Amino acid sequence: MIQKLFPLDKNYILRQAQFAMEEELLEQMVYELKRSYTYLYNPLQLMDSTYAAILDNFEFPMDRIRMIYRQLCGVYRYVNGDNQLELLFDGKSHFDKFKEDWEKTFIQYVRDLGQYEPYVKTMLRMTILYDTESRAEWAENHCKAFINQHFGIRVIKRHGELKLKAS
């Protein structure tokens, strides 16, 4: 991670907290994805080959889901864009507080997104039901677009810089 001029800036500490929680929250993301699939497509939990494959599969390329996790990290930092640290009176460090806040918010994000079929389908295509690289890349791009649309964020690329604008 690149150290900037202000190491105690809220966004740097928040980014470190998000990075520290990444592996744990990726597992949570997969769990919530399976839960969302069950809720949307198989509420009676009837065992068929697709449902069994989704429940039993834990081996898939993590690169795609990691990109979605990092996009959600960026959305959270953008939505909570103030860079002022608040005063904490409970003895916790800002790092620990940001980890707790991020974990709660991330789980809420994933549960909210899990109510939408396009999100669940694209996440399944690039993770648990992964079959080809081209299909996974297509699903990742659609998932990113859906997340941006859901949170009302547009990413406009100009002159090599990424600028985020709220709709």
Image: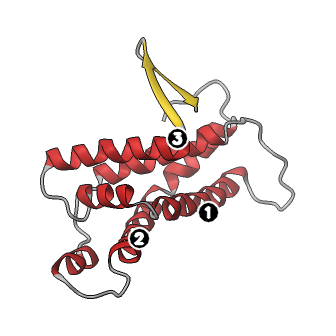
Instruction: State the CA–CA distance, disc 3 to disc 1.
Output: 16 Å
In the rendered image, the quadrant that contains the C terminus is top right
Instruction: State the CA–CA distance, disc 1 to disc 2.
Output: 17 Å
- Which label lies toward us, 1 or 2? 2
Considering depth in this image, is 161 or 142 the residue closer to the camera? 142
Give the residue at x 77% y 41%.
85
As helix, strand or loop, the secondary structure at mark 1 comes to helix
**Mark seen at residue 36:** 2
Mark 1, residue position: 104
Give the residue at x 59% y 26%.
4
Residue 130 place in picture, x, y as percent? 19, 59
Q: Mark 3 or mark 2, which has the lower sequence index? A: 2
48 left or right of 165 in image: left
Q: What residue type is labelled 1?
A: Lys
Q: Mark 1 or mark 2, which has the lower sequence index? A: 2
Q: Mark 3 or mark 1, which has the lower sequence index? A: 3
Mark 3, residue position: 74
The quarter of the displayed image where residue 102 is located: bottom right
Q: What residue type is labelled 2?
A: Ser
Give the residue at x 33% y 79%.
42
As helix, strand or loop, the secondary structure at mark 3 comes to helix
